[in-house]
Amino acid sequence: MNWDQARWERLEQKVSREMIRARSDAGSWAVLVRAARSVLRNYSSSFFLVTRFLPPAKRAEVEVIYASVRYPDEVVDTFPLTPEEKLARLRQWEESYRFAMRGTSAAEQIRAGVPWILTGFSRVAQNRGIPFEHYLSFLAAMRRDIDAAPFASLRALIGEYVYGSAIVVGYFLTHIYGWSGASARNEALECARELGIALQLTNFARDVQEDHLRGRLYLPRDLLAAEGLTPVDCFEPDNEARMLRAIRRLAGEAARGYQVARRLLPAFAPDCRTAISACIETYEALNRRILTQNGPLERRLSVGAVEKFRILPASKYWRLPLAYAGVL
């Protein structure tokens, strides 16, 4: 269940108070990570599960990364604000990010009004060498959602939107996961790119109806045209069969991305491959459901708990009850 704006604001106040009261940087970081973990657990059961297979230090950083992309997305998608107010929030968020990346302490940042999420993200970005401009690209994609318009082609969708909304997020995670050797860096980043695209296309294919209710359409015009559709008529009841075929075309593009990601998986550091593999398997299972769906369009597909459990490595099952008990 999505949190409303008021709950996000209460969390901001609570975490900021606790971070200021913390007696050390380690204590402040622990407060921040607990809050980030609660965000991930609430918003993505699938990603929450697969991240339980990461080493603790890397898992904490991934949780912070997730919060750093979740909050701006919620501002755009769910906060009851005008477009102008959303843009203003994102501008302020970007200014806080620029301030946080100057390298001041966590306590100084919080006292200066920097949101706890950006205090955490700046620490991870600086420690892991994440390029400064990547987060700016992400925020640009979020601004694009405020004044959404259909994309001309799949290439345009990826270059003008998915790069910021998903590819750079994959790059964030790659800098945390690490690579198997100096020569594997480029392959790991390529894997992140292909997996980021695939995950985003799967989400687009699954959420077509939900996005439509928000005034958005991520199915490119060329995929619609291949089925004799346009952005104007594609949601008419008589066009549902053709719309489903267009959605399956998008899922087909995602399927190729998962294949490439699986091939390049050995480029990542060994201690993260289990989690990345579980991510590929989980979302690929969802993508297969999309490829075989026959409607209705309003039905939002998902991967059930039992199927997720079967996908995860049997040798790691003991982690799951600990995760849900809040130990991991």
Image (cartoon, helix red, strand yellow):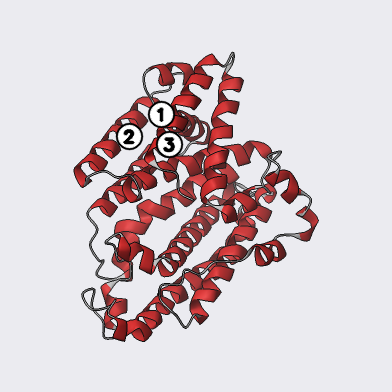
Residue 113, image x and y in percent?
Answer: 36, 22
Q: Secondary structure at mark 3?
A: helix
Around disc 3, counting alpha carbons within 10 Å, would you say few (fewer than 14), some (14 to 19), or many (20 or more)?
some
Residue 229, image x and y in percent?
Answer: 26, 82
What kind of residue is marked 3?
Trp
| Apparent side of residue 80 relative to residue 35 in the rendered image (left or right) | left
Toward the viewer: 74 or 64?
74
- The residue indicated by pointer 2 is 93
State the residue at coordinates (41%, 78%).
249
Q: Earlier in the sequence, mark 2 or mark 3?
A: 3
- The residue indicated by pointer 1 is 115
CA–CA distance between discs 3 and 1? 11 Å
Q: Are marks 1 and 2 in contact (CB under 8 Å)?
A: yes
Tell me if residue 174 can be seen. no
Q: Secondary structure at mark 1?
A: loop
Quadrant location, the C terminus:
top right
| Apparent side of residue 139 relative to residue 175 in the rendered image (left or right) | left
The circle drawn on residue 8 is 3
Instruction: Report the mark closest to the observer, 3 or 1.
Output: 3
State the residue at coordinates (54%, 15%).
21
Instruction: Report the mark closest to the observer, 2 or 3.
Output: 3
